[in-house]
Image (tube, rainbow, N blue to C red):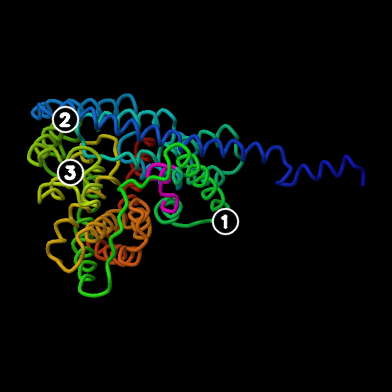
């Protein structure tokens, strides 16, 4: 066998193939880019919240003007400049993973939509909306990886899907600095499976995103460090109580959003259909009213409030969880882009604070964590992801078993009210809407 033939054969091996190495390099750069965009988005979101806080610090009444104007502008821009940017971004990513029409996938995961997601989420935070950036970061990460996949002209659709899945997982990992949760979220929520072809891609993307986040932002924990424990005994009553209340509340919230995706009843439904921008203005007024009644605690992502509750330094109204839940519901129904991850964790923390008074035998800090995981698991119906997110975001492995038990019980309770996972149901509605639009 000649030397030339041996070289040609060697070049076809994955280790030596120039084409394979080109794909690897582009993919690694894409994962790093997702992390950089996620970190920049996080800093911009914090700046947007700080700007809003400074504006309303001494003139709280200004929110009555800012919230309606901001939500109105956001909905108008969403419908006319950035169509497809509405909602959290996770249902859209799930839809893209199940579609076979590459044109439709490219529409959902276009870089234009990704840019709109960033701009309009920041606009929502500047006007006081109760939204998060994690859901949008998932769609943004998926869009970046999809764009790189298209530049490589991948021959098979499953390879593009693997990149989309990896981009979404890297987005979660970088947004929360929770690499384990990023991997599990890809399995449990985005794909509901972990094929061999996608597994290495997702793991590599999360590792690259995690290294980038660690290098630039350090090994931080989003909600601080919690060292509380829940020993065996009477304190475990908090597990049952938080799972029951959090599962019911989270399931009711999810069922509300799913039903609303089919159309609101009565006057509100007609207003949304005929005058969506006007409906957003009404939602802005409601958001301002909730914010004023809560003393300003219901605005924004809820990071500061949740961190304060975890660390035991927050001074919030007793009804904080109800205020935050109402503000999050109104913000989502208005039609503006924005996620529900962070607000849901904040609602859960407030719920845990309230329930801690009913279980004096359990440390209040532990009940706050149980409330977070119970409500979040009830909303997204992804108990393992919920457990890992709360555990990683508070750097508390001592609570792993109580958190997992609470998440699994809350998941079961939530299913009694909401039979379908929120993001999966919204993804189906999104695909149906796309089909109707294409047919018309």
Task: Decide whether residue 175 is among the magenta residues.
Answer: yes
Q: Earlier in the sequence, mark 3 or mark 2?
A: 2
Q: Is residue 276 left or right of residue 229?
A: left
Q: Earlier in the sequence, mark 3 or mark 1?
A: 1
Q: Is residue 363 left or right of residue 176?
A: left
Name the residue: 21% across, 45% down.
305
Tell me where residue 299 appears, x and y as whole percent.
Answer: 18, 38
Q: Nearer the viewer, residue 348 or 312?
A: 312
Q: Nearer the viewer, residue 434 or 131?
A: 131
Q: How many marks?
A: 3
> What SS does tag 3 mark?
loop
Name the residue: 21% across, 50% down.
309
Give the class, few, some or many, for how many residues have Cα within 10 Å of label 1's Cα (few <14, many ≥20): few
Q: Decide: marks 3, 2 in contact (CB < 8 A)? A: no
Give the class, few, some or many, for how many residues have Cα within 10 Å of label 2's Cα (few <14, many ≥20): many
Q: Decide: marks 3, 1 in contact (CB < 8 A)? A: no
Q: For the magenta stretch, what is the residue range?
A: 171-181
User: What residue is pinned by disc 2?
Assistant: 67
Give the class, few, some or many, for how many residues have Cα within 10 Å of label 3's Cα (few <14, many ≥20): some
Q: Is residue 387 left or right of residue 143?
A: left
Q: CA distance from mark 3 to mark 1?
A: 42 Å
Q: Nearer the viewer, mark 3 or mark 1?
A: 1
């Amino acid at each position: 066998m000649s030397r030339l033939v041996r070289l040609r054969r060697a070049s076809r091996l994955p280790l030596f193939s120039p084409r394979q190495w080109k794909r690897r390099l582009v993919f690694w750069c894409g994962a790093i880019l997702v992390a950089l965009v996620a970190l920049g988005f996080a800093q911009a979101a914090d700046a947007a919240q700080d700007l809003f806080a400074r504006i309303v610090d001494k003139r709280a009444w200004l929110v009555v003007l800012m919230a309606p104007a901001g939500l109105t502008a956001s909905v108008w821009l969403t419908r006319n400049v950035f169509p497809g940017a509405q909602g959290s971004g996770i249902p859209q990513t799930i839809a893209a993973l199940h579609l076979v029409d590459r044109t439709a996938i490219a529409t959902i995961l276009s870089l234009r939509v990704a840019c709109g997601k960033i701009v309009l989420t920041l606009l929502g935070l500047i006007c006081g909306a109760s939204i998060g950036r994690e859901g949008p970061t998932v769609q943004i990460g998926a869009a970046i990886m999809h764009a790189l996949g298209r530049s490589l002209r991948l021959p098979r659709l499953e390879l593009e899907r693997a990149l989309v899945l990896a981009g979404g997982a890297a987005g979660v990992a970088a947004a929360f600095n929770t690499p384990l949760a990023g991997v599990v979220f890809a399995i449990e929520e985005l794909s509901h499976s972990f094929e061999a072809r996608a597994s290495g891609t997702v793991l590599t993307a999360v590792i690259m995103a995690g290294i980038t986040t660690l290098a630039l932002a350090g090994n931080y924990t989003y909600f601080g460090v919690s060292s509380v424990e829940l020993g065996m005994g009477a304190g475990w009553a908090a597990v049952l109580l938080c799972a029951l209340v959090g599962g019911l509340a989270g399931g009711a919230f999810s069922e509300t959003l799913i039903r609303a995706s089919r159309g609101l009843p009565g006057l509100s439904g007609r207003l949304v259909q005929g005058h969506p921008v006007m409906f957003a203005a009404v939602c802005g007024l409601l958001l301002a009213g909730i914010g004023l009644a809560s003393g300003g605690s219901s605005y924004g992502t809820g990071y500061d409030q949740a961190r304060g509750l975890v660390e035991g330094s927050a001074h919030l109204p007793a009804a904080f969880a109800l205020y935050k839940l109402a503000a999050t519901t109104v913000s989502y129904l208005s039609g503006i882009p924005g996620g529900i991850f962070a607000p849901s964790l904040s609602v859960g923390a407030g719920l845990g604070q309230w329930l801690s008074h009913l279980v004096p035998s359990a440390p209040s800090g532990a009940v706050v964590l149980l409330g977070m995981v119970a409500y979040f698991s009830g909303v997204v119906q992804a108990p393992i992801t919920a457990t890992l997110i709360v555990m990683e975001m508070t750097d508390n492995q001592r609570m792993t078993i109580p958190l997992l038990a609470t998440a699994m019980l809350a998941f079961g309770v939530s299913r009694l009210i909401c039979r379908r996972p929120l993001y999966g149901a919204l993804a189906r509605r999104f695909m149906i809407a796309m089909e109707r639009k294409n047919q018309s």
